[in-house]
Every structure is written in structure tokens, then in C-alpha cells.
Amino acid sequence: MTQKKAPKASKEPAKAEEPKCTDVNCPIHGNIKIRGMVIEGRVVSDKMKKTVIVERELLRYIPKYERYSKIRSRIAAHVPECMDVKVGDKVLIGETKKISKTVNFVIMKVEK
């Protein structure tokens, strides 16, 4: 009976395969520039293809009553292929050139 030798384990760590991002509108792998505002918000809807709705809460001062009121702002933002974004995630979005009729922001970073 002959015994087969087990293959030698390499000393190099296994390389994790990164997802290939072919999106031209990706701020990391593509060639789109971030200019203007950078906003932090929470994803409230991801029903569109490659687009999410990001909501942020602001405080607005009302001089008549000398108090503040909470208002919400909803912004449509493009999701690059290399990012996995779900409802409830905190994201950092940056202003870019117009990508479509309603989208001129792109997600830069996801903070779960």
C-alpha cells in the first residue's frame, strides 16, 4: 500500500478576492470626482436599481416661537457595484455631477 502525501500548505496567507468594480460612477474605482457637499445620513429605501434614498435630520430655528423644529431631508444617491448597502445603514455621500435626472450624489463610505 502506498500512501499519498498531503499537499504542502503555503506560508502565504490566502488572498481574499475583491469584487471587481466596473462602475464608472464609483468614487474609488471609477473616474467620478466628488465636489461640493459631503453629507452623512441613513438609508431609508433601496428599491431602485443602483440608487438609494438617504435621509438626514436637521434642526431649523423658528424665530417667532424661539424654538427649534426637526426637519428631514431626503436625497437620492448612486450605489457603486463594490458597495453593499441595505436599509438602516449609515452612509457618507458626496456631491458629484448629475448622474441622472434626480441623482447627483454618490455613496463614498458605508458605516453599518
Image (tube, helix red, strand yellow):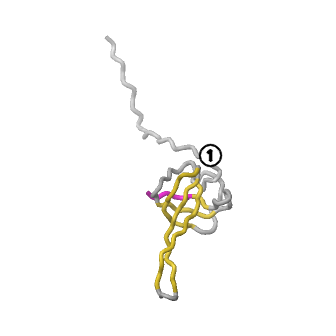
The 10 Å Cα crowd at callout 1, few under 14, some 14 to 19, many 20 or more, is few
**Residue 30 position within the rendered picture, expressed as x and y whole percent measured from the top left:** 63, 52
Please determine whether, in this image, residue 71 is positioned above or below residue 28: below
Q: Residue at x 52, y 51 (%)?
A: 83
79 or 26: nearer the eye? 79
Residue placed under numbered mark 1 in the picture: 22
Q: Which residues are magenta?
A: 107-112
Q: Where is the N terminus found, in terms of image quarters? A: top left
Q: Residue at x 52, y 87 (%)?
A: 63
SS class of the residue under badge 1? loop
Q: Disc 1 marks which amino acid?
A: Thr
Residue 111 falls inside the magenta stretch = yes
Prevailing SS of the magenta stretch: strand
68 or 90: nearer the eye? 68
As drawn, the residue found furthest toward the top would be 1
Image side of residue 42 versus residue 25, left or right: left
The number of callouts visible is: 1
Please determine whether, in this image, residue 96 is positioned above or below residue 25: below
Residue 48 falls inside the magenta stretch = no
